[in-house]
Amino acid sequence: MENLKKILEEKTTDLNNDAINWPDSGGHFGNYGGCYVPEILMHPLEELTTAYQKAQKDPEFINELKHLLKAYVGRPTPLFLAQRLTEYIGGAKIYLKREDLNHTGAHKINNALGQILLARRMGKKRIIAETGAGQHGVATATVCALMNTQCRVYMGTEDMRRQSLNVFRMRLLGAEVVGVDAGSRTLKDAINEALRDWVTNINTTYYLLGSALGPHPYPQMVRDFQAIIGQEARAQILELEGSLPNLLIACVGGGSNAIGLFSEFLKDSNVEMVGVEAGGRGKELGEHAARFHFAGGGRPGVLQGTFSYVLQDLDGQIAATHSISAGLDYPAIGPEHAYLHDSERVSYVTASDNEALEAFQLLAKLEGILPALESSHAVAYAIKAAARLSKNQVVVVNLSGRGDKDVHTVADVLGVEL
Amino acid sequence: MNRIAKKFQALNKTERKALIPYITAGDPDLAATEALILKMAECGADIIELGVPFSDPMADGPVIQRATERALTKGTKLIDILDLVSRVRKVSQVPIVLFSYFNPLLQFGLEKLAKKAAEVGIDGVLVTDLSPEEAGNFLSILCRYNLDMIFLLAPTSSDERIAKVTKLARGFIYAVSRTGITGIQQTLSDTVVELVLRIRKHSNLPIAVGFGISSREQVKEVCCYADGAIVGSRIVAEIEACKDQTQLLEKIGSLIQELASD
């Protein structure tokens, strides 16, 4: 407790600043974010920042990305009124932002496409990526196939076991999938290994990071590429309802689908936002992935290039995490979420493994949609929240991915042999 | 003048160069680490880099990753490492640089760490993942306690970065021999010579070269153009390979003697 106070004192913030102007030129969101990396990576990150800033202003880059998002990914994705779920709960109207309908089945492709175009502009011939649930790995393998680029994906061996379907998909797409057997054998360890590859092959290689994490400029760049989710949702809800939603809900692992939905609404002070972390199977450190859960070991710290909330022990060693969904099974949260948490613009709650599992089944039966186990956490909280709201209020849930990849996991937990 | 500056001054007078071994504290255990520091100093180590184990050593290769895991399995804590240094100081004045990732230091409390480090007799701190851009606060704390912050420069560092970093650096500058992670390599690249020359244009501080240096020949080669050589993975690999604990000191001692010999 005393340590936390000290850390926050040493890094005092003015949280009243306008959130939507973040990050600063050093990649800080308030005190969070920044660039905590070995010197070897500083120059490549500066190059990446410059290349990204130029691309953002280049109509050719913007138009090609727009074209591919439409023609290849299938955007815009629908904003779907979940009528039966709404009636079943009997509270607020629930809309689903159908990112699961994107090509490759999740929001990850939005970012992968933006970054591969950037990598091509930078003349990088080799792409590396990390993946947890496999959705970012699949998205990266997909865009690499499209752009005829060499691709290597690092994946924890525990995640490879949980998501064997996605491992095979990546290989079919021509990517090399490298298992990482260190630490907890999950997303965190895959990122360590990808970073080691990057520092070793810096001249030829582009690191296509999949979430709003890591050193600057990744949290900003990934947010910007995912902001299309919120831009579309805002226009769609205004057309459908004639007013802004009361509540936005998204699951938060690293936090890219959530920040993609939220960023466009941050200036709308009447729109409430909730990020849902993985509550796992218990409150003790190691049993969940709830970074904002102080009693559970979440405190500000530095991991993998950024200052944010991190699950750790008292000595600053990074803790093991647990979630039924590989995509939320990560000990740190994107730095912009840390800022939004402290400034109280966004609330963060948890949904347990069991709640997610129930939501998964409920959405399947009521709406004919199998959500990813990650997105099921958002659905689980939406069920609770909608019940407390009145019928004339509106909730938008980011359905960040589809659940086909999770069918084996769900069958396992339900004791069904396939 | 602190122990690091004194050491380089003394080396300079006799036209010698510094041998700087790295070991991970707590590998195989803290008692061994204490004995190893004294043995290495006795056998020709000029400065000791003492590694603080961290669960996610993203800049390290497999050898140091495994050492870190062994140390953490033994329950090695930063406070115990600091206490160890105070015991070493009763018998040896070998300069000691604490080598760490940022998070364990941050969670300990930066002010508390600096105070304690100065008390026990640590001379400098090198933080692998603390870029000069983020180092401001910690740097000013270390300055107040007269501790050196050692910075790394790499072949990828631009001249602008070199100019910026050399203004902040104290003690010595750690020149990284190549891009990549820590580990043993057969031949050193030419880029490091160029890097050392580029740094020299901006700074009069001693320059030590590290990453991949594993043999007496490589130490000698580096010392032709730099002020010292840092040897890490080779020593840590030797500690790992030594199955008979009673032989450990002797083995590492003779390795240091070999690396230090002219």
Image (tube, rainbow, N blue to C red):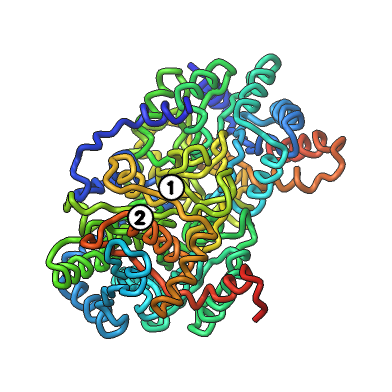
Q: Which mark is residue A37?
A: 1
Identify which residue is drawn at 72% across, 38% down. Answer: B74
SS of the residue at dot 2?
A: helix
Residue A152, position in %: x, y? 50, 72
Q: Which residue is mark 2?
A: A45
Q: Amino acid at mark 1?
A: Val
Left or right of residue B236, residue A171 in this image = left
Q: Is residue B161 above or below residue A148?
A: above
User: Is residue A88 positioned above or below B69 on the image?
Assistant: below
* Tag 1 near tag 2, CB within 8 Å: yes
Residue B204 shows in this picture: no
Q: Residues within 10 Å of mark 1 (few under 14, many from 20)?
A: many
Q: Amino acid at mark 2?
A: Leu
Q: Which residue is drawn at the image coordinates 31% and 30% (left, top)?
A: A12
Chain letter of disc 1 in the image:
A
- How far is mark 1 from mark 2, CA to CA? 10 Å
Say which element carries label 1: loop
